[in-house]
């Protein structure tokens, strides 16, 4: 379980080649990587919003009750799982321009592993300071972009020069998907705060 997390963070080139040789399935990817890793930001956000509360500075902190935080967490979790599959489909669609494009299966597996730094960065939600969460998102996004760039030739077998276009396009769409996830989270959190009668 989660055998590739450390490798992707410490020696990504070697890890991409190992993942490439395993011929993994989408079911295995989700059951042994994505389902567990996606729990990190969700569980940490649940704990942070119910035990600590969002800190906006100036001594203003907003906490959610367990029920609101639970339902927001479930929706956030489902959105993350869908986003991984969506990004894999986007990569597959963009790779069709090349003579030997990878299969949709490989692209979804690729997207699941590329998201690893973003999942790990979700730990900061245990203490939900807005500036700290934004910093973690930026760092996670930068390292995901690095994994994306390294993985295109090592996992998808697309040349580095050709892969640069796929990297840039995927990163741009990925940022939009991330913004959508954040927007959903804020809306759900804001709805919970509204139910509690907190003025945002």
Image: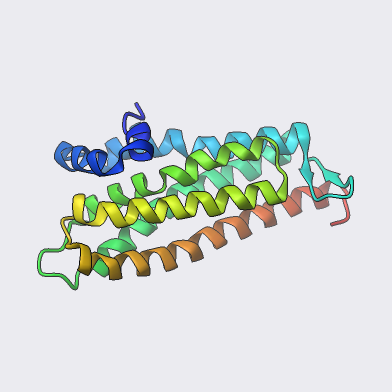
Q: Left or right: where does residue 43 sit relative to residue 8?
A: right
* 1 shown above or below 13: above
Please indicate, yes or no, whether residue 106 appears anywhere in the rendered image: yes
Of the pair 18 and 32, the residue shown nearer to us = 18
Image spot of residue 108 (x, y percent): 30, 51
Image spot of residue 168 (x, y percent): 36, 68
Rendering quarter of residue 4: top left
Q: Residue furthest left?
A: 99
What residue appears at the point 39 percent right and 56 percent down from the top-left corner?
145
* 158 shown above or below 60: below
* 145 shown above or below 65: below
Total labels drawn:
0
What residue appears at the point 58 percent right and 36 percent down from the top-left corner?
123
What residue appears at the point 19 percent right and 69 percent down from the top-left corner?
96
Image spot of residue 59 (x, y percent): 89, 45
State how the image is colored.
rainbow
Q: Quadrant of the C terminus?
A: bottom right
Of the pair 77 and 1, the residue shown nearer to us = 1
Rendering quarter of residue 122: top right
Image spot of residue 92 (x, y percent): 26, 62
Q: Quadrant of the N terminus?
A: top left
Q: Left or right: where does residue 140 sit relative to residue 96?
A: right
What residue appears at the point 24 percent right and 56 percent down from the top-left corner?
152
Q: Residue furthest bottom?
A: 97
Q: Residue furthest top?
A: 1
Q: Left or right: where does residue 2 sit relative to residue 158?
A: right
Q: Left or right: where does residue 114 sit relative to residue 40?
A: left
Please indicate, yes or no, whether residue 25 appears anywhere in the rendered image: no
């Amino acid at each position: 379980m989660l055998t590739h997390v450390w490798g992707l963070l410490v020696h990504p080139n070697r890890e991409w080649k190992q993942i490439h040789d395993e011929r993994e399935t989408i079911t295995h990817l989700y059951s042994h990587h994505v389902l567990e890793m996606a729990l990190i930001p969700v569980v940490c956000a649940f704990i942070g919003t119910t035990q600590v509360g969002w800190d906006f500075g100036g001594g203003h902190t907003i906490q959610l009750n367990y029920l609101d935080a639970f339902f927001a967490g479930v929706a956030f979790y489902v959105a993350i799982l869908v986003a991984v599959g969506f990004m894999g489909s986007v990569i597959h669609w963009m790779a069709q321009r090349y003579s030997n494009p990878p299969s949709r299966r490989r692209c979804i597996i690729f997207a699941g592993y590329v998201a690893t730094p973003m999942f790990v960065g979700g730990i900061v939600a245990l203490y939900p300071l807005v500036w700290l969460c934004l910093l973690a998102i930026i760092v996670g996004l930068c390292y995901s972009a690095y994994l994306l760039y390294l993985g295109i030739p090592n996992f998808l077998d697309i040349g580095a020069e050709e892969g640069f276009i796929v990297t840039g396009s995927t990163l741009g769409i990925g940022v939009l998907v991330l913004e959508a996830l954040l927007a959903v989270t804020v809306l759900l959190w804001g709805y919970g705060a509204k139910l509690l009668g907190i003025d945002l």
